[in-house]
Image: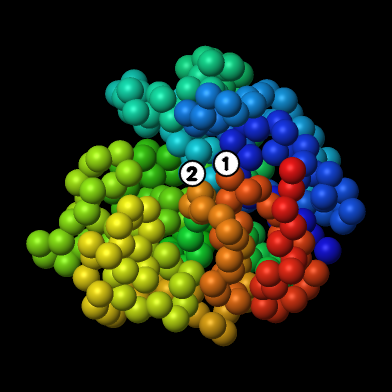
Amino acid sequence: MLTVVPDIHADPQRLAASLSVATKTGHVAFLGDFIDAGADPSAQVDEIGVLTEIKGLIDGGKAVGVMGNHELNAILFHRQDSTGQPLRHHTAKNCAQHRSFIDEFGIGSLAARGWTDWFLRALPLWREIEGLRLVHAFWSDSVIETVRDRRPDGFLRAEDLPEIAAESTAFGRAVKLLVSGPEVPLPPGVSFTDFKGHRRHHMRIAWWHGSASTWRDLALSVPDPSSLPDTKIEMGHVNELYPDDAAPVLFGHYKMQPPLHLVHAKAGCIDYPAAPCVYQWRGEGRLLPGNVVPVR
């Protein structure tokens, strides 16, 4: 049995509760996003404690992990390009997202570089474990093949970082997709206002809704899906949906709202910050709701 743990975001209580369930199996897989506590003022925050414990488990061979978008963003944030500019711009928005890590380690410090070096060494973009797939945000065979052509094991190298930051090549764009998920352009003349009041002309797509076909069914992070067309999405976008005959895949990233529901027997998001959970995989070829375990 493998206990799969989604996004921790520097929360020591969530980590401890997840690991208390995992002790029954002895084998743990983390889905990335160990760092960056976010803006919740009530959240417990312990960047160094969370990272130290997870690193000890992974380096000690008791756990594995994959890279999340926050780890990739941190790697870029604390490194510079050939002109001395940060690979991830230090805008107010980017600094706010990364605030708890910056408060703990500073910007570009030896500690910040040391931890982000470890992210590169220890965290591939995906893993396949005896019939189970693990990725932070998006599994697409074609996208993974684009990365695999250069990095067969899914581990990035320092020389890859400038084109990932610029998203200037198919390789760079593929890396970002795996950790951040796909967005698709809305039909001409269609837009929506997101939760922060910004007008959006692109939409996150719930690529794991295997039987869904309309814009409304596939919408993610849209406050009012009824404002979208109740028409079928273009075939080019439907091709991104996870197939029914593939191996099961687990992922985090999307901050889903409870109650937890596995809408696809082969693809499941288990990132529910308001109702934290883990998935205990026992070798099944189809994901089972009964194997989702709440943690307190």
Q: Nearer the viewer, residue 4 or 84?
A: 4
Q: Which mark is residue 69?
A: 2
> Compared to 83, does 30 lie above or below?
below
For label 1, the residue is: 33
Circle 2 residues within 10 Å: few <14, some 14–19, many ≥20: many
Tag 2 secondary structure: helix
Answer yes or no: is residue 54 visible. Answer: no
Q: Quadrant of residue 153?
A: bottom right
**Label 1 or label 2, whichever comes before in sequence order:** 1
Give the class, few, some or many, for how many residues have Cα within 10 Å of label 1's Cα (few <14, many ≥20).
many
Q: Residue at x 64, y 26 (%)?
A: 44
* Residue closer to the observer: 120 or 24: 24
State the image coordinates of residue 72 (x, y, percent, origin top left). 49, 40
Which mark, by number, is residue 25? none
Q: Tag 1, which secondary structure?
A: loop
The residue nearer to you, when weighing 34 against 131, is 34
The spot of residue 166 in percent (x, y) is 31, 42
Q: Residue at 50% of width from left, 38% of height from top?
A: 70
Q: Amino acid at mark 2?
A: Asn
Quick check: 95 left or right of 43?
left
Q: Is residue 40 left or right of residue 167?
A: right
- Above or below, 260 against 284 in this view is above
Q: Is residue 151 visible?
A: yes
The amino acid on which the numbered mark 1 sits, given as a three-letter code, is: Asp
In contact (CB < 8 Å): disc 1 and disc 2: yes
Q: Position of residue 259 (x, y in %)?
A: 58, 59
Which quarter of the rendering shows the C terminus?
top right
Q: CA distance from mark 1 to mark 2?
A: 7 Å
